[in-house]
Amino acid sequence: MPTDFKTCQTCAYRWMTRADFLTDNHISLVGYQVNFNKLEAGLFLFNHNCGTTLSMQVKDFKDLYNGPIYRDRCTGKEECPGYCLRKDKLDPCLAKCECAFVREIMQLIKQIPKKQH
């Protein structure tokens, strides 16, 4: 039996695929919780219209990005705007930082057109 991509823990709504989830107009990306030890384990936070917040790991969306991934982290340095330290800050980061690819994934997610129910 195939597994769902995600099920809402509050209302039990099920998304069969990632595309279903990302194009649902009842879902919105609202935050990011960084995991500096393992960036792919960081969490994207999505609000569902039922009132719950769903968290999903960066690794579930990493394949959306095909740009450069930098080796060094800029956190705390002059070129770092500190976006990763604020979970509600979804802006892209222009620093050549190992964390920048996550911010680019967020931009890609935000640009996906939503389907009307």
Image (tube, rainbow, N blue to C red):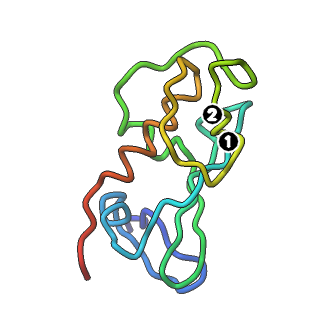
Q: Position of residue 47 (x, y in %)?
A: 53, 70
Who's the residue at 67% across and 48% down the image?
33
Which one is in front, 3 or 51?
51
Reading the image, the residue beneath label 1 is: 34
**Which quarter shows the N terminus?**
bottom left
> How many angstroms separate mark 1 from mark 2 (CA)?
7 Å
Who's the residue at 52% across and 28% down the image?
100
Task: Give the left or right position of residue 62, taking residue 84 as reference.
Answer: left
Instruction: Give the residue type that dot 2 points to.
Output: Leu
Q: Secondary structure at mark 1?
A: loop
Q: Position of residue 51 (x, y in %)?
A: 57, 82
Which one is in front, 58 or 106?
106
Q: Position of residue 92 (x, y in %)?
A: 48, 37
Which one is in front, 47 or 79?
79
Mark 1 or mark 2: whose residue is earlier in sequence: 1
Closer to the observer: label 1 or label 2?
Answer: 1
Which quadrant would residue 63 be assigned to in this image?
A: top left
- The residue carrying pointer 1 sits among few (fewer than 14), some (14 to 19) or many (20 or more) residues within 10 Å by Cα, namely many
Which quadrant would residue 45 be assigned to in this image?
A: bottom right
Reply above or below: 42 against 93: below
Instruction: Give the residue type that dot 1 points to.
Output: Val
Contact flag, marks 1 and 2 (Cβ < 8 Å): yes
Task: Give the left or right position of residue 22, taking residue 48 as reference.
Answer: left
Reading the image, the residue beneath label 2 is: 39
Reply above or below: 92 against 66: below
